[in-house]
Image (cartoon, rainbow, N blue to C red):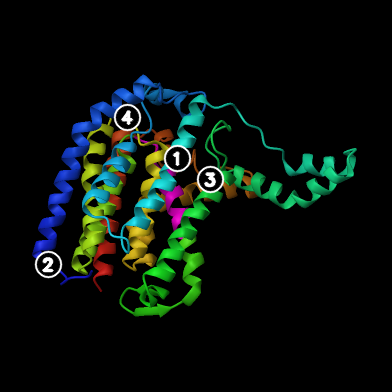
Amino acid sequence: MDITPFSLDLLKLALIFLFTSAIGAFLWAPILTKILYKYKLVRGAEYDFTLKSGERKQKIGTPIMGGLLVIITVTIITILFNWQRKYTYVPIGVMGISALLGAADDILNIYGQKRRNRDWQHTIILIKVHKNYLMRFWYLLTLPWTAFKRVVSVFGSHPGKGIQVHEKLIFQFIAGAITAWWIYFKLGPYWHSLRIPFDGQMFVGWWIIPIIIFFVIFTANAVNIADGLDGLAGGSLIATFLGLTIISWAEGRPAYTILNATVSGALLAYTYFNVKPARFQMGDVGSLGLGALFAINTIAINHTLLIPLFGFIFYLEIFSVILQVFSRRIFGRRLLKMAPLHHHFEFKGWNEEKIVMRFWLIHLFVVIVAIWMSLN
């Protein structure tokens, strides 16, 4: 369904979808806010230790799951007006899977019971002393999985009432695998190569499958980690999806042009209510869902290698967490005052607005660079 690149009619249509999405989301945002307050889906210090000191105490009681404003608006508009089996049903489906995962995590963090994972040292003891030899064998057989759960748990952000890191990775792997299947088997041989700016195509064949799975998982978690300050994730995602809208339009891909424009419009409404002081916050339901959709839409227009640029501030945030964890585990000292990076600057005395605005500007600049590279 590709049409002439730089089509003025397509641009006009994309703007209509952007306006419709923004207005629609804006109109039902008060209803969502009332629902979130009614069911007490609000932030609490008992599972978010960053709220226990300083100015961040003011965020206690702010509704979470505000990302539903974007997820639901985009889903409804796409199903009604931009539903194409070849192009949009998998992106929307994978966004839905990731959003459901995030919603479950948000709800369990509030209403769930604290969970405890057995570490691998305890498992080794059970292998040695358990009276039941079948259980000994079972613990031995599952020891690698137990060790994996322990390793990835260091990247968790709360004490364990919600979905655990290893559980998230399983569901995100499924979402990534669905995306890879769709790209590899349904979109055609063109997507079996990676598009390299300034240098054409590099054929990778079936290797595109693990590459896609990695980017879907990593990008969803990157957006999730960046969702820590009022307006930061929402404003940055606006720049990202507007950039993808421009590239999709320039290359004559109407389904993705309209989808990215729809997301951009809904994000404008969300961010209006999310700037400090936030009426509601994105929550995992929004950050995981939109992070996955961002990765899929970029892969679908074959600009996979530019995902770190279109998502620059998100990748900067997740790498700050990874480096902090490795620094503490290997060298026994913190690289940053606190990870992710936005908390580091908070501890250095920067106010929230200063951090968000500067991160927005840096991110916007890199997205513009990514657009320029995409057109070459």
Task: Estimate how packed mark 4 is, as few (under 14), some (14 to 19) or many (20 or more) residues with alpha carbons within 10 Å.
Answer: many
Residue 11 painted magenta: no
Quadrant assignment, res 212: bottom left
Q: Nearer the viewer, residue 372 or 24?
A: 24
Q: What mark, if any, has residue 102 been given in the picture?
A: 1
Label 4 secondary element: loop
The mark that comes first in sequence, 1 or 4, is 1
Label 1 secondary element: helix
Label 2 secondary element: loop
Give the amino acid at mark 4. Phe
- Give the x, y percent position of residue 74: 27, 46
Name the residue tied to disc 2. 7
Tell me whether the residue at label 2 lies in contact with that at label 1, contact meaning CB atoms closer than 8 angstroms: no
Q: Residue at x 42, y 39 (%)?
A: 284
Name the residue tied to disc 4. 280
- Give the x, y percent position of residue 226: 40, 43
